[in-house]
Amino acid sequence: MRCVISGSFRKYYENIYQTIDVFEKLGIKVLSPKKSKIINPGENFAILETDSSKDIKTLELNHLEAIRKADFLYVCNPSGYMGTSTLVEIGFAIGCKKNLYFLEQPQDPVIASFANYIGSPNNIPR
């Protein structure tokens, strides 16, 4: 299985980093993001050491392409928080007919209606 993780890299990258570890231990390949460090702390859009570009549009297009190739999108949304980029990625995943899994229940009822699973990555159906 292959997945992509979305969420606020600026606010919750440590959670995302830990979630990558969990998926890898479960034998699920994380296509994006790669485990790395943020190289531009304090800026609005997080850029990782492993990113192939520093161009925001290119990075987002690469993340969206990874969603297209993945079996599912996992949204790391502690306290239900989802930023604008994450919402774009969720919409893209819906358009690609991907399963959507969330750490926390989405607050928006439309997004919540697309949730296939809410909770820890350890319990995602395989």
Image: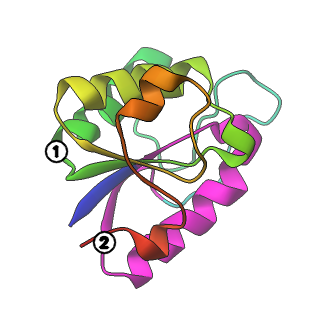
Whether residue 18 is in magenta: the answer is yes
Percent coordinates x, y for residue 123 in the rendering: 43, 74
Q: Secondary structure at mark 2?
A: loop
On the rendered structure, is 4 left or right of 12? left
Figure quadrant of residue 10:
top right
Disc nearer the start of the sequence (2/1): 2
The residue at the far right in this view is 42
On the rendered structure, is 68 left or right of 30? left
**Crowd band around label 2 with a 10 angstrom C-alpha radius: few (<14), some (14–19), many (20+):** some
Q: Which residues are magenta?
A: 5-34
Which amino acid type is shown beneath numbered disc 1?
Lys
Q: Secondary structure at mark 1?
A: helix
Instruction: Tell me if residue 6 comes above or below residue 120 in the rendering.
Output: above
Q: Which residue is mark 1?
A: 69
**Crowd band around label 1 with a 10 angstrom C-alpha radius: few (<14), some (14–19), many (20+):** some
Percent coordinates x, y for residue 109 in the rendering: 51, 24
Which amino acid type is shown beneath numbered disc 2?
Ile
| Colour mode of the rendering | rainbow
Q: Which residue is mark 2?
A: 28
Percent coordinates x, y for residue 108 in the rendering: 56, 23
